[in-house]
Image (cartoon, helix red, strand yellow):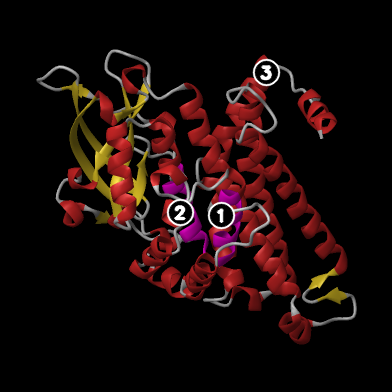
Amino acid sequence: MSTSEPPPPALVEAIERISHRAASADTDAVFSDDTLKDLGASGLLHAMVPREEGGLGFSDARFCAASLSLGAACLSTAYVWVMHCQQADLVFRHGSPLVRRAAKKVIDDGQLLCSVTTERQSADTLFPGIAAATTSLVPARSRDRWILRREAPVVSAARHAGAFLATAALPDSNGVTMAWVPASASVGGLAGMRRCSPLNGMRATENRSLALEAEGDKDSLIGGADGFSGEARVRWSRIAHLGWAASWVGAAAHVVEQATGRPARERFARRQAVGTLPRASLARAVWELESVTGALLRHQREVSGEATNDPVVEHVTIRSNLLKVGASETCFRVVDKVVAEIGAPALTPGSSIERHWRDLRMAALVTRNDSLLIGAGSLLALRAYEARSLVEDLWRN
């Protein structure tokens, strides 16, 4: 498929159907079976599966494009899909043949790969991320085998999981590993998954809490006995930040389009307004979205290796953290301005603007922004910020 080729009609139609059911999914706080079927039938579940293994083999650019489109349609769906792609990307890049075969079967069966990174001990944050993994693998009776018992208080769309990738500490080590855990390892199965109280935003992620009890061998660990580190861990984090940022840009851009389209112009037109937004506010909103989009495109090239030969360089990690923080805060700020200009009608229950406004408020809590800023600041304290990479990149083009 050439880069100039448009998205397949099946993908476009699936996203349109997901958009149509977004309001009811939000009201019911469910990640619906029909949405999962649409993701499967359109090929989106296979997005990060290599072509040689029967997938679509999306580039990072296409992954961002699909994230943006899904974000405009339904941020809950986009969030779950990005996390599924994050796990699939990791498995097919760094997993053993055993794990890759198991993952391919899960995806072929129309199920999700879900992430387990939170623990009950980390009550201070909603989605603390990989640093919260304190549960350790326990050596099993036979050599090279391990046992994992894990509490997972927040797992998005867990009801649809065919497998989990769970972070855990390596025994007698400071390292962290990522363990492949089949859904059958969920204690009590579906009945053992306790539904969490619906959040105010991203309600349709349908979060559940569950307990895992699994046993495996070294082939079931991403990164093997040496732990989940280096390029694997770094890309795993960056690909999520890319997908989330793209989905937030899609949602915010959709709100601006809704607020300035023909129906809005006819209903809210004023002498000093374009649609519902005063002209100066509209210009600022579009510039803020363009700024985030520029940062997103630059970081996508870095993550893909198009702008650097060192995927673990500190400055790329800094920009990954700052992209997540900046996109989450900026996209919400843009939508909040639209809501303020429109007034109460913007918050009519069931409207796409109201839903995106609530969903984007949650964006800063998907891995807490303050922890990412501290991480980026710590790296900057050790190594001064450089603009040289941007200059060199521009010269190359």
Q: Quadrant of residue 284?
A: bottom right
Q: Say what secondary structure mark 1 lies in.
A: helix
Using the numbered discs, state the Cα–Cα distance from disc 3 to disc 1 in whole angstroms. 33 Å
Q: Please give the residue where the numbered disc 2 appears in the rendered image.
A: 81
Which residue is farthest bottom? Answer: 266
Q: Nearer the viewer, residue 297 or 77?
A: 297
Q: Quadrant of residue 392?
A: top right
Q: In the image, what residue occupies the spot 52% across and 29% down?
A: 234
Does the residue at mark 1 contact the one at mark 2 (Cβ under 8 Å)? Answer: yes
Examine the residues drawn in magenta and state their main secondary structure: helix
Along the polypeptide, which appears first: circle 1 or circle 2?
1
Q: Is residue 350 magenta?
A: no
Name the spot of residue 247 as percent of width and height, x first. Answer: 58, 55
Using the numbered discs, state the Cα–Cα distance from disc 1 to disc 2 in whole angstroms. 8 Å
Q: Amino acid at mark 3?
A: Ala
Q: Is residue 297 above or below residue 393?
A: below
Name the spot of residue 158 as percent of width and height, x first. Answer: 31, 53
Along the polypeptide, which appears first: circle 2 or circle 3?
2
Magenta highlight range: 62-86
Q: Please give the residue where the numbered disc 3 appears in the rendered image.
A: 381
Q: Please give the residue where the numbered disc 1 appears in the rendered image.
A: 67
Does the residue at mark 3 contact the one at mark 1 (Cβ under 8 Å)? Answer: no
Left or right of residue 256: residue 169: left
Identify the disc placed on residue 264: none
Left or right of residue 315: residue 390: right
Q: Is residue 230 above or below residue 275?
A: above
Does the residue at mark 2 contact the one at mark 3 (Cβ under 8 Å)? Answer: no
Q: Nearer the viewer, residue 353 or 232?
A: 232
Q: Is residue 326 above or below residue 379?
A: below
Q: Amino acid at mark 2?
A: Trp
